[in-house]
Amino acid sequence: MGPLAGIKVIEMNAIGPAPFATMLLADMGAEVIRIDRQVSGFLNGDGSVIGRGRRSLGIDPRKPGATDVLLQLIDSADVLVEGFRPGVMERLGLGPDVCLQRNPRLVYGRMTGWGQTGPLAQVAGHDLNYLALTGALHAMGHADREPTPPLHLAGDMGGGAMFLAFGIVSALVEAQRSGKGQVVDAAISDGAALLSTLYYEMKQSGEWRERGSNIFDGGAPFYGCYTCADGGFISLGAIEPQFYALFLQVCEIDDPAFERQWQRQEWPALRGKLEAMFLTRSREQWCRLLEGTDVCFAPVLDFNEAADHPHHQARGTFMHSDGVLHPAPAPRLSRTPAVAGKVGKNGEQSLEILRELGLTPAQIAELRAVGAIG
């Protein structure tokens, strides 16, 4: 039903953002066949929510005959996604030169940390390292200590998976016009750098100061998180003058010091006063006062609480599959909505896929004999 219905994607199972990108494509209706190694529970396979919406072919591309099978699959595919170090797919005989020669319309998506080229291309790394090199990590955390490692949302998922999916869909649109595929070189370091565009602009204009003293990093008293009397937390984002004024009004704050919202030298003192104020009530009491107003407020919910919030309940932001809670597909399309497929197991559709390719029972038995399939 989704907007990518009719698009066939071959996913070489890997860790990190590549499977999340193909999950997005599957949610939007693409037919995704995941190539899994013959190891139970390997990576994003058995029972993994990120593996939802795929069929799985359990095959070891290093075994005799396996590459020929995979090339047959790729011949009829619109997209190939891989997340290995540069050169791995080439050594398997599945590099872009080979695949695009056989299937000129193929969009060949490559997901790495450092990119396909450059002095660090072959070096191992993780989300934290990629963020560190872009300047983004240096801007995160408190001023009086080392930068705080964030969840891997800005790097792996934002700078990596989202840009890979965006690049693939862009290349698919272009291929409809030109009839030609191309390689999408998605690097987490590139994407994370691009996500930092606003902060580089602020740096150039002199608006960005040292870590922990800016509007969006907790420096401003009107933009941050506070502890409540019961140990819960709330978030406040009253940046614009009208929202800030409403916040002061609803909370009955008449201290003239708060009239100096944009005088940075006042921020530490104002934060101290707000810290004391928020400690006078529980999180629930602050919610009753502030939630639903234009103060720009929300309680800080944990993973156990988020799905039960009335707003998420009303929109169906979360869903259950086989007893597992996970976020529902996004964004929402009015005519061709996304649908989350079921969570499957490694190699669950191996025989089905091989038969669709036209392999005979004898050929399948041969692959099994050499250990290419389970």
Image (tube, rainbow, N blue to C red):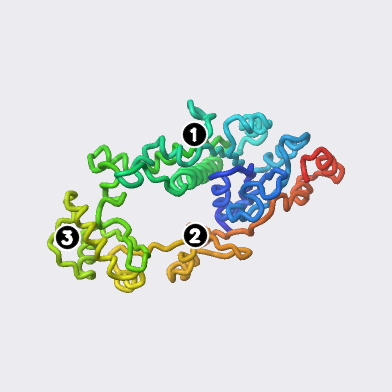
* Residue 274, horizontal then vertical, whole percent: 24, 61
Name which of mark 3 and mark 1 comes first in the sequence.
1
User: 142 or 106: nearer the eye?
Assistant: 142
The residue identified by callout 1 is 114
Considering every residue shown, the one lying at the far left of the view is 256
Which mark identifies residue 258?
3
Badge nearest the viewer, 1 or 2: 1
Query: In this rendering, is residue 310 above or below 227?
Result: below
Quadrant for residue 309, please give it: bottom left
Residue 297 appears in the rendering: yes
Lateral position of residue 372 relative to residue 292, left or right: right
The residue identified by callout 2 is 333
Lateral position of residue 57 relative to residue 154, left or right: right
Q: Amino acid at mark 2?
A: Leu
Considering every residue shown, the one lying at the far top of the view is 119
Disc 2 secondary structure class: loop
Lateral position of residue 144 relative to residue 341, left or right: left
Dot 2 alpha-carbon crowd within 10 angstroms: few under 14, some 14 to 19, many 20 or more? few
* Residue 216, horizontal then vertical, whole percent: 30, 50
Mark pair 3, 1: CA separation: 46 Å
Mark pair 3, 2: CA separation: 43 Å
User: 167 or 351: nearer the eye?
Assistant: 351
Considering every residue shown, the one lying at the far right of the view is 362
Name which of mark 1 and mark 2 comes first in the sequence.
1
Q: Amino acid at mark 3?
A: Phe
Question: Mark 3–mark 2 contact, CB under 8 Å?
Answer: no
Instruction: State the residue at coordinates (29%, 47%).
Output: 212
